[in-house]
Image: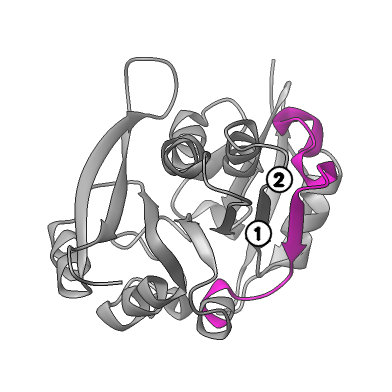
Amino acid sequence: MKRFVLLDTTPLPDGGALCLFEYGEDFVIKLEGGKGGQLMNTRTHGSEDALGEIPCRRIASRSHPRVLIGGLGMGFTLSSALKNLGNQAEVVVAELLPGVIEWNRGPLGVKAGNPLLDPRTQIICADVAELLKKEPGSFDAIMLDIDNGPEGLTQSANSWLYSVVGLGACARALRKGGILAVWSASADQRFSNDLRKAGFDAEEVKVYAHGNRGTKHTIWIAQLASGLR
């Protein structure tokens, strides 16, 4: 019988911790105490794959594309981005929690294909919000998978990123014709409205978490409205 085996914990900025469990052949990340159930599972990552694939396929033909991923998670979005970009691309990953980076260098790495070992990957242990402020006009695509998305925040520090002001910072960090992609566990009409207020034309894409049935997640694919950089 499979059971959850705690492998490690890493503290969160607002208190509490993330916990990495082994569950049979899979790995699971939960909040300490089990609040909110499973946050991530190596068996169900279809929407994380799509978050990397959709925007990167659209900008892959550009010369030396540079993309930013906010939130390393279990490495599947990074792996998918690398698969859909050429050899001249650069993929910058901002991950706030050192423990999550170490998990991806250890037990999680094999599950995602060891994307941190790819020479196109640059991993930075930092808040993606600070990186956005420091690098205007630097990215062809930005992919955000922070917390549970704009509607399901568990850490108050993440609220700025999904605000109109934070989305404006994303817009300024994009190159001309760049794409912002945002993952969420659920749909959120308020967030769609905030994307428009920040100057984006956005579509909501529904993607299965695993296979072709069951739970669906939401990915917003957003580009700056005509006439705006």
Point out the stretch of residues depicted in magenta: 108-130
Which numbered disc, 2 or 1, marks the residue closer to the eye? 2
Question: Residue 88, which numbered label?
Answer: 2
Q: Which residue sits at x=31%, y=72%?
A: 229
Any part of residue 154 in sight: no
**Colouring chosen for the image of the structure:** one colour
Quadrant where the N terminus sits is top right
Q: Is residue 196 magenta?
A: no
Q: Position of residue 82 (x, y in %)?
A: 65, 38
Q: Which residue sits at x=26%, y=78%?
A: 164
Residue type pointed to by label 1: Val
Residue type pointed to by label 2: Gln
Q: Position of residue 123 (x, y in %)?
A: 75, 60
Question: Residue 93, which numbered label?
Answer: 1
Question: Residue 80, which numbered label?
Answer: none
Q: Judging from the image, what secondary structure is the residue with disc 1 in?
A: strand
Q: Earlier in the sequence, mark 2 or mark 1?
A: 2
Any part of residue 110 in sight: yes
Q: Residues within 10 Å of mark 2 (few under 14, many from 20)?
A: few
190 horizontally vs 53: left or right: left
Q: CA distance from mark 2 to mark 1?
A: 16 Å
Determine which quarter of the picture holds residue 70: bottom right
In the displayed structure, 214 sits above or below 158; it is above
142 horizontally vs 116: left or right: left
